[in-house]
Structure formats: C-alpha cells, structure tokens
C-alpha cells in the first residue's frame, strides 16, 4: 500500500480490490452487496458507526456517504488484475 494514504483510503482501496477480484471470479454482485451491508450493520451495532444518524437504515441510505471520494479510489483499482502479493 502507498504510504500517503489515510487508514480510510487504504481500506477503500483494499475493499475495492477484493470486490474486483470477486467480480472477476464470477461472484454474485447481490451477495457481495449483502455482505457489505451486513458488515455495515456490524460496524453500526458494535463499533459506533453512524452515531449521528437516528437508525441503521437512515445511516446506510444517507447521502452523507463520501460517494465521490469512494468512487475516486474505486476508479484507481478498477480494471486491475488481482495479485495475491498486493
């Protein structure tokens, strides 16, 4: 990983690399999305994610997500082939 990335940016790059790998390997995108939502729920229930929102649904459907930033990092890894040493 690059040293100039914040922990959140590094996480975004890593999760998107894994999603690209899943897509390349034929994983069901619906199942991948459900897994991400389950992870979001776990972070909400046990680690304080979304504390500024009234409930989980409001949190995950909020426009407060930094979509442009996430999309930027996704674009950086999109189309790259997966390597186990990355």
Image: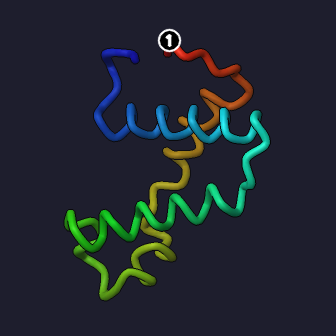
Task: Name the quadrant containing residue 74.
Answer: top right
In the image, taking residue 83 as reference, residue 4 lies left or right, namely left
Q: Residue at x 30, y 32 (%)?
A: 6
Seen in the picture, residue 4 relative to 30 is either above or below; the reply is above
Residue 27 pos. (x, y %): 73, 47
Seen in the picture, residue 17 relative to 38 is either above or below; the reply is above
- Residue lying farthest to the bottom in this orientation: 54
Q: How many marks?
A: 1
Residue 16 pos. (x, y %): 56, 38
Task: Name the quadrant containing residue 31.
Answer: bottom right
- Residue lying farthest to the top in this orientation: 85
Q: Quadrant of the N terminus?
A: top left
Q: Residues within 10 Å of mark 1 (few under 14, many from 20)?
A: few
Seen in the picture, residue 75 relative to 80 is either above or below; the reply is below
Residue 43 pos. (x, y %): 30, 63
In the image, taking residue 55 as reference, residue 68 lies left or right, namely right
Task: Name the quadrant containing residue 83.
Answer: top right
Give 68 or 36, whichever is nearer the viewer.
36
Please, what secondary structure does the residue beneath circle 1 have?
loop
Q: Residue at x 40, y 76 (%)?
A: 59
Q: How is the image coloured?
A: rainbow
Q: Residue at x 38, y 16 (%)?
A: 2
Give 45 or 3, whichever is nearer the viewer.
45
Q: Residue at x 53, y 55 (%)?
A: 67
Judging by the rendered image, the residue that carries numbered circle 1 is: 85
Give 45 or 69, whichever is nearer the viewer.
45
Give 57 or 53, whichever is nearer the viewer.
57
Residue 24 pos. (x, y %): 76, 34
In the image, taking residue 9 as reference, residue 37 lies left or right, namely right
Seen in the picture, residue 30 relative to 69 is either above or below; the reply is below
């Amino acid at each position: 990983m690059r040293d100039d990335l914040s922990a959140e940016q590094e996480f975004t790059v890593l999760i998107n690399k894994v999603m690209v790998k899943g897509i390349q390997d034929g994983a069901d995108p619906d199942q991948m999305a459900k897994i991400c939502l389950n992870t979001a729920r776990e972070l909400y229930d046990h680690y304080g994610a979304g504390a500024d929102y009234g409930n989980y649904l409001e949190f995950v459907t909020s426009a407060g997500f930094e979509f442009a930033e996430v999309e930027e990092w996704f674009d950086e890894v999109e189309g790259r082939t997966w390597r186990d040493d990355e």
